[in-house]
Amino acid sequence: MIAIVDYGMGNLRSVQKALEYLGCEARITDSAAVIRDASHVVLPGVGAFRDAIDRLRRSGLDRAFTEAAASGKPVLGICLGMQLMYEVSEENGLYEGLGLLPGRITLLDAPGLKIPHMGWNTLETRACPLFDAGTPQTVYFVHSYCAQAVNGDTAAVCTYGKPFTAAACRGNILATQFHPEKSGSVGLSMLRRFAAMS
């Protein structure tokens, strides 16, 4: 069973519907016990970092998610969920994240371009459980902040003004700044591969 963490902010139903379309059992939950029992865990998110990390911490779901990651089960952060997995965010202040991925979330560095970055854009990919290296993937974004730095955890790069980390991978810990559940067959393929991870 794939647990989709419900902390009151996120595109939960669209993620669930995409996984169910693939034949997966996917459950939206705010229960730490359900997250512990799940084989895979998804942390979605839409909105502001400060509110999201506060809700996660007040509910105790931050611990449930980081414990799932530490146990070795596959975990996936989507959009704001990806940002929450980093150490620090600069969105409307300075806020500590979950620390599962090293680095800082900053405003997109896109001089002359509209922010938020909304719509379809192409990834340059490295080898990752979600996709193969060197295969261009066109996916759907809606965001103003990102992990601008490209480092050893970067699994895909997107250029919007300047390059940024569009997907990250550290063992069983996966994250996408884009929305795979809104990215058509390409995104469904990524979710299928995530669900197949053991």
Image: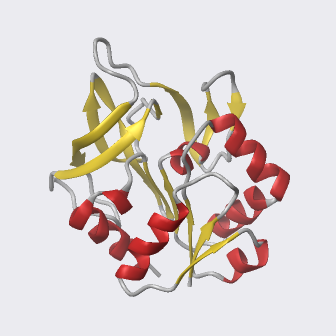
Q: Residue at x 54, y 63 (%)?
A: 12
Q: Residue at x 16, y 53 (%)?
A: 134
Q: Position of residue 1 (x, y in %)?
A: 56, 85
Seen from the viewer's position, the closer of residues 56 and 40 is 56
The colour scheme applied to this rendered structure is secondary structure
Question: In this view of the protein, can residue 120 be seen by the observer?
Answer: yes
Compared with 160, 168 (above or below) is below
Q: Residue at x 42, y 81 (%)?
A: 20
Position of 12 with respect to 68 (left or right) is left
Q: Position of residue 189 (x, y in %)?
A: 27, 70
Seen from the viewer's position, the closer of residues 151 and 69 is 69
Compared with 183, 188 (above or below) is below
Q: Position of residue 34 (x, y in %)?
A: 71, 79
Q: How many marks?
A: 0
Compared with 29, 114 (above or below) is above
Q: Residue at x 66, y 63 (%)?
A: 6
Residue lying furthest left:
135
Residue lying furthest top:
112
Quadrant assignment, res 92: top right
Q: Position of residue 137 (x, y in %)?
A: 19, 53
Question: In this view of the protein, can residue 196 be seen by the observer?
Answer: no
Compared with 77, 80 (above or below) is above
